[in-house]
Image (tube, coloured by chain):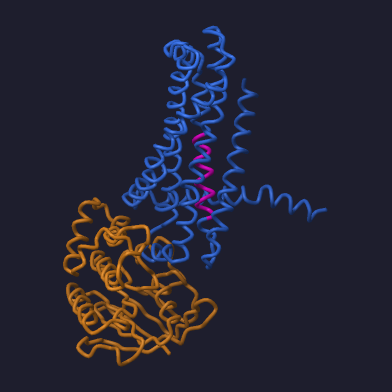
Chain colours: A orange, B blue
Amino acid sequence: MGIIYEFRDCTIIHENEKMPILNLTINSGEKIGIIITRDLYDFALLYFLFFINREYEGYASIKNIEFKDLHESEIIQILKTQIHVSPHLPLISNLKLIENIYLPLLYHSNLSENILFNKAYEILKQLGIESSYNKLPAYLTNHEKRCGLLARAFLSDANLVYYSHIIDDSNREYRDFYLKQIIDFHNTNKDRITIMTFRQKTHIPEDFKFDKIISLK
Amino acid sequence: MKRILDFLFERIFGTTYNLASFLYICLEGFFTNFPRGINLFINVSKKQIYFTGIQAIPITIYIGIFMGMVVVTQIASFITGIGDLSTITNIINIGLVRETIPLLMAIVTITRSGSAITSELNLMKINNEFLTLRSLGINYIYSLIFSRIASFIISLLCLTIIATFMSILSGGISLYLFTNIATEDFFNTFFYRISPFDLVLLLLKAMFFGLIISTICCFYGLVIKKSVTEIPQLTTKAVLKCFYYVFIINIFLDMLVVLWE
């Protein structure tokens, strides 16, 4: 298992505010749990991992290339292999649910829209929200929106998935449902990295065996 | 004095410079990314053509018919016989085909679609949706903005052709109803007198209007900072700027025509 991400004494600077120092290595196939008490830190980490914000101090690298040295074309290649499930970066409001799900692949792959539509519909069926495939995000329930984000992640078959507070605000039934989907998806690829953030330590599911759990306070 | 000159320069050329830079960025985005993401580009373009072009066909037909009727009704009182046909066709050619129809269609698309584009993009920006696209590795300038500009030009071009066709048709029919001049005579004279140059000018105007309207509306759709209250302000600003630039381009093209002729 090779090191994919490495953060040494890394301080992410988000909107002029410094985050707590981050020391973390992420290897392929790992499940990482991160306890983040402030939403701002969750924002900051998400934006940093997805190259929206690249301001930091210390050392941060991906596959031994420092974040500072990455070119735009390299960043695009990296972004193709990772995806987020986060309310901070929502579904696109003027696209229907199913269009939102196949949007990344519509851009990055050469597959036709019909093929992508069928694949996305199958995932929606698996998540039990296929009846809402034609709705705009404004007409979806919170559960449907989360499932939409999950479906987008599952369809993209990304190597790294960042789940931001997905189970923090959910009731027991939905929580178990999301966890089962996340575990099943993680297990479909032995190299897949799963990062999940939680607001409190007590929210971390006991049956979900994380390789590392860190805290950003 | 220098400050006053700077201020005037900023006021007159500042926006033009910003718009030109924005258009350059869009074009650069297109040429550096093409053909990657062409499926998404086509998807967004099809939707924009549907909203700006296809949905506006009824109002375009309506405007075309009534403009043709209005012009002919106004000049019907001067008509004494078939000998005046060349005058009538000249008025319809210059008044309608060259001037009124392209301007009217520009106004219709500014108010119908231009304002919609600005407010839609503003909302998307406030909701972090552009960041979502960026985080998914999608170049939104190319796939969302440039596709809108391209499809807006195509839509306005098609709408202008439809409106022109309808106005000539209704002009001919109205002329027959008001003056008993045969429709066939009118069309024969009209198509004899109209030159390819007139048609090229019509299409050029539609193309430039489409380009400037969509560029302005997309530009003001992206400059919003954080507050929802900025949306109506920016939409109004975009609409007014569109009018301003459309009239300037219209005068500029007309002046070129006068010099040419």
Q: What residue sits 56% from the left and 57% below the top?
A: B234
A205 sits left or right of B107 in the view: left
Work out which residue is located at the far bottom of the displayed protein and give it: A202
Whether B94 is drawn above or below A183: the answer is above
> Can you see residue B212?
yes
Work out which residue is located at the far right of the displayed protein and give it: B1
Q: What residue sits 28% from the left and 55% below the top?
A: A109
Whether B28 is drawn above or below A20: the answer is above
- Figure quadrant of the C terminus of chain B: top right
Q: Position of residue A48 (x, y in %)?
A: 42, 74
Q: Position of residue B37 (x, y in %)?
A: 34, 52
Foreground pick, A157 / B144: B144
Task: Tell me the chief SS of the magenta region.
Answer: helix
Residues drawn in magenta: B206-220
Q: Position of residue B77 (x, y in %)?
A: 58, 16
Q: Is residue B217 magenta?
A: yes
Q: Position of residue A57 (x, y in %)?
A: 50, 80
